[in-house]
Image (spheres, rainbow, N blue to C red):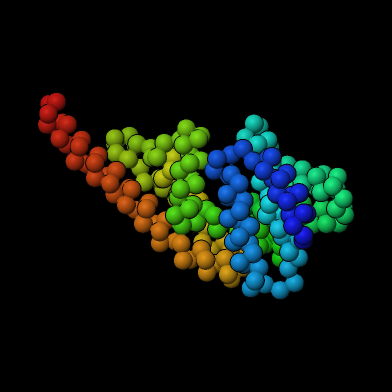
Amino acid sequence: MNKQTYILIENYMLECMRDAAHDKEHIYRVLYNALDIAQAESNVDYDVLIAACLLHDIGRDEQFKNPKLDHAEVGGDKAYKFLTNNGFSAEFAENVKSCIVAHRFRKSRPPGSIEAKILFDADKLDVTGAMGIARTLMYKAGMGDPLYSVGDDGMPSNGEGDEQPSFFQEYNFKLKNLYDKFYTERARQLAAERKSAAKAFYDNLYAEVESAYKSGKGLLGEIVG
């Protein structure tokens, strides 16, 4: 891929990005992680991989406006149309589209090509470690979700088994379960290096919250009778 082609695709991506938790810097991190992962793989089509990485979240705005839409499917269709309208072959556009469509967690449509597997892994890496915590907090704040929910006993829940959305619930439902879901060995290695940072943040935050409630509720009861 020459620089002119890269800039063409990059500029279209920049026009589409609206979500703070899925901004252009997320795109670049995914791209850079993907290029790292690809170095350990064989027969990678870097043109397909780079285009798919740049365009994988261009359907986010449509999904935000209509949650019934799947941003991966919307983005795949948008990418195909953009690429074919700008002189790329239908075969190339279809290969990029298939990567984008398969980059979410779905048993019904797992990534097939090596480029799709690399994109999947690179995207999931950005939800691991400290970065994953930071992005999840940003996303949850934007949705108006709390850090944690409080049970009937008046104590904060750690999020395990919760149905009510919160950061603690998201950590237990998704974030802590990412680390065995990668397709490539390099991605598994990178994810493993990040795991302790995410767990330490969650553990420390829950300990601080629980401690405040345990001591504070007792003190309040003494003061207000």
With 136 as the anchor, is 73 left or right in this view? right
**Image quarter in which the C terminus is found:** top left
Q: Residue at x 24, y 45 (%)?
A: 211
Residue 204 point in image, percent of width and height: 32, 52
Q: Residue at x 66, y 68 (%)?
A: 38
**Image quarter in which the N terminus is found:** bottom right
Relative to 130, is 170 above or below?
above
Q: How many marks?
A: 0
Q: Decide if residue 15 is in sight here.
A: yes
Residue 103 point in image, percent of width and height: 66, 53
Q: Nearer the viewer, residue 217 or 42?
A: 42
Q: Nearer the viewer, residue 95 or 162?
A: 95
With 162 as the anchor, is 30 left or right in this view? right
Residue 216 point in image, percent of width and height: 20, 37
Q: Decide if residue 112 is in sight here.
A: no
Relative to 12, is 196 above or below?
below
